[in-house]
């Protein structure tokens, strides 16, 4: 199977995973990216089994709506059982780097509300140590240079993702050359930088379950 087929397999596996738990009142939290898109497309086949979705980006909201799946504002939702999303990197503790699609802040917010985070990824995303993928940090635009200087002090090489404006009006710094031995600590340290909105480390709220697409089939890993 090629990478696209692995993504489709885990998208379907995530639907199979949540399906027994859905009812008319269920709200499904939906992530962003090419793997999340495969999940959305598979979810459309069971749209009669749940109430609607909360999306972590405008792009995912549009894709959900194109399938006729109602999309709700998170503020109008009291909770949700599942959040399903991809990752740029994930380790065996199910800590992740996310934000390659610049949706990290909304992803982190929806994940915080959900009882269970189900990560869907092809096997290329599973790594022994996070940090080969540059760590995205969303910043308030006027703070970009200040945050970049602080990130250098933490040992990284931040690069402005020029031309990208997030759904929240923020900008993105991609931090290269970090060897992330302690993801939870680094997540906290970056959160302390004034002007940083969110960083793409999902360690304090990592995934609960990983559905990993491999040549031997979809494997289920738990935190
Ligand atoms: C978007 C994300 C995505 O989940 C991440 O970039 C993985 O995307 P893909 O499934 O396309 O590889 O965090 O902000």
Image: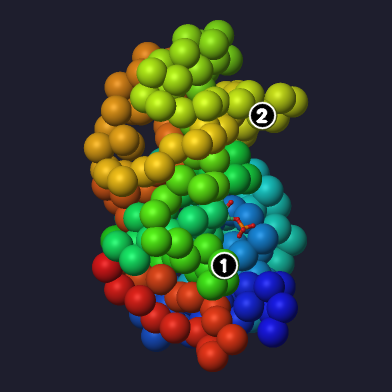
Q: Residue 38: percent from the left, percent from the top? A: 65, 70
Q: Residue at x 30, y 73 (%)?
A: 222
In the picture shown, does residue 186 fall above or below 59? above
Kindly state the secondary structure of the residue where label 2 is placed.
loop
Residue tagged 2: 161
Q: Residue at x 43, y 22 (%)?
A: 151
Q: CA distance from mark 2 to mark 1?
A: 23 Å
Instruction: Give the camera-side residue of 92 and 48.
Output: 92
In the picture shown, does residue 108 fall above or below 50? above
Whether residues under marks 2 and 1 lie with C-beta atoms below 8 angstroms apart, the answer is no
Specify the quadrant that holds the C terminus.
bottom left
Q: Residue 184: percent from the left, percent from the top? A: 27, 43
Looking at the image, is mark 2 or mark 1 earlier in the sequence?
1
In the picture shown, does residue 161 fall above or below 105? above
Residue tagged 1: 124
Pointer 1: residues within 10 angstroms few (<14), some, or many (20+)? Answer: few
Q: Residue at x 60, y 81 (%)?
A: 9
Q: Residue 199: percent from the left, percent from the top? A: 43, 35
Left or right position of 184 against 66 = left
Exactly how many numbered labels are in the figure? 2
In the picture shown, does residue 77 fall above or below 21? above
């Amino acid at each position: 199977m090629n990478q696209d087929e692995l993504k489709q397999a885990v998208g379907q596996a995530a639907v199979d995973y949540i399906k027994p738990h859905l009812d008319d009142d269920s709200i499904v939290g939906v992530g962003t990216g090419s793997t999340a898109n495969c999940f959305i497309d598979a979810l459309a086949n069971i749209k009669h089994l749940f109430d609607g979705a909360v999306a972590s980006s405008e792009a995912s909201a549009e894709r959900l709506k194109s399938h006729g799946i109602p999309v709700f504002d998170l503020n109008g939702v009291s909770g949700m059982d599942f959040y399903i999303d991809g990752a740029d990197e994930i380790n065996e503790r199910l800590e992740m780097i996310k934000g390659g699609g610049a949706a990290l802040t909304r992803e982190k917010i929806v994940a915080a509300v959900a009882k269970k985070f189900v990560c869907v990824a092809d096997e290329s995303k599973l790594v022994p140590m996070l940090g080969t993928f540059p760590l995205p940090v969303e910043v308030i635009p006027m703070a970009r240079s200040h945050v970049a200087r602080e990130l250098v002090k933490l040992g990284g090489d931040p690069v402005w993702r020029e031309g990208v404006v997030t759904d929240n009006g923020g900008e993105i710094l991609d931090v290269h050359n970090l060897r992330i031995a302690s993801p939870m600590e680094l997540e906290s340290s970056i959160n302390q930088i004034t002007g940083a909105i969110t960083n793409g480390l999902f360690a304090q709220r990592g995934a609960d379950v990983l559905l990993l697409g491999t040549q031997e089939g979809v494997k289920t890993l738990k935190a």
